[in-house]
Amino acid sequence: MMKNVPPSSPLRIGTRGSPLALAQAVETRTKLMTAWDWPEEAFEVVVIQTSGDRIQDRPLRLVGGKGLFTKEIEEQLLDGSIDIAVHSMKDMPTAQPDGLVLDTYLLREDVRDAFVSPSTDSIASLTQGARVGSSSLRRRAQLMHVRPDLDVVEFRGNVQTRLKKLAEGVASCTFLAMAGLNRLNMAHIATLAIEPEDMLPAVAQGAIGIERRSNDSVTAALLEPLHHAGTGQRLAAERAFLAALDGSCETPIAGLATLECSELLLRGEVLRPDGSEKLSGERRGAIGRGAEMGYDLAQDLLSQAGPEFFSWR
C-alpha cells in the first residue's frame, strides 16, 4: 500500500451518532490521514443508529445489554456497507461475530471516572439520602458499597443528555468517563477525577477499538500504523478477565491493567448489584501473559464468591 495514493472510493468508517462516538470516528480518520498522507475526502464517516441509541426509557440490562450498541454496526460491516467500525471498547462484548476481528486499538485515554456535581465536591460530601444518577451497574454497585444511604436513580443518555438532566435537578450528581470528556474538550465539566484506587473503572474504559472484516487484508494493513501495542496488551488482560466472569450489563465488574516496566499489573473486582459485597484481587506478571492472568484472576474471584454470590443473574 503506497502513501499519497488514496483508494478510488472513500474508506467508510462506521460509528454511532452521539457527539462522543463522532469525535472518536474523527480521531480515527485523522490518524489514518496522518499515517497515509491522504486527504479527508479519502474517508467517509457513516452514522449508524443502534438499538442502544433508540432505547432510552429502560436500563440496557433489561433489553439486551452491551450488544445493543454494536449489533447494527457489525451487520453493516459484515455486509460491506462500511469498511471499518469505531467502538468505545467498554461497550464491546468480549466475542466478535464470525467474520469480524478487533485487533487495532488507539492509544488509551484517561481511564478514570469523573464525579460531576453542581452542588458538592466529592462522594464523601454528599448529604445522606442524596439522589445520584447513573446508568452504570458497576458505578451504582461501587457507590452503594461505600455509601448505602444514597438514592441511586437510572440516568441514561449521552454526555449532553446527562448534563441536561443534572441541570434540571433530576439528581445531585452523576458520573461520566474522563476519557469521553477529554475527547469532547469538556474536561472542565468534571468536579473531580476519581482515582482507580477509589473507583476501579470499567474494563477497557478510555480505549477505542477499530473492527474490520477478518478476510480484508488491505484494511488490516491500512490500520496497522494506528495500533498501540501497550493498549492492546492491557486490554488482552482486562477482556480475558471479563470474558471468564461472563461479564455483561447485568454484572457489576471492574478491571484495570497497567504496564509497569516489564510487568503487567491487573486489578479486578466484582460486586453484588446492591453493593452489599465486593470481591477483589490482582495479578502481576509478564506482559505477554495478560490473557492468562485475566482468566486466572477471574477464576479466583469466582471460587471466592460461590454460587450464591451470582444468584441474582
Image (spheres, grey):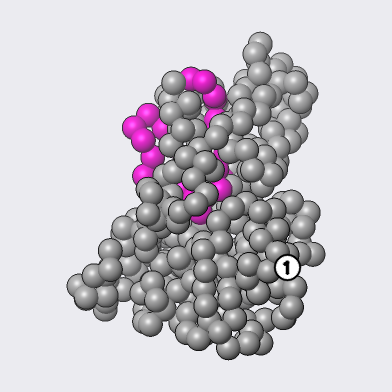
Left-right relation of 171 to 140: right
Query: Quadrant of the image for the N terminus?
Result: top right
Q: Nearer the viewer, residue 259 or 99?
A: 99
Left-right relation of 89 to 100: right
| Residue at the outermost left position | 307
Task: Return the residue at label 1.
Answer: 190
* Residue sitting at x 70%, y 17%: 6
* Residue sitting at x 67%, y 39%: 22
- Residue range highlighted in magenta: 80-105
Q: Is residue 100 magenta?
A: yes
* Residue 131 placement (x, y as % from top left): 58, 76
* Residue sitting at x 45%, y 74%: 141
Whether residue 262 is visible, yes or no, is no
Image quarter of residue 12: top right
* Residue sitting at x 56%, y 84%: 129
Q: Above or below — where is 151 with respect to 16?
A: below
SS type, badge 1: loop
Query: Quadrant of the image for the C terminus?
Result: bottom left
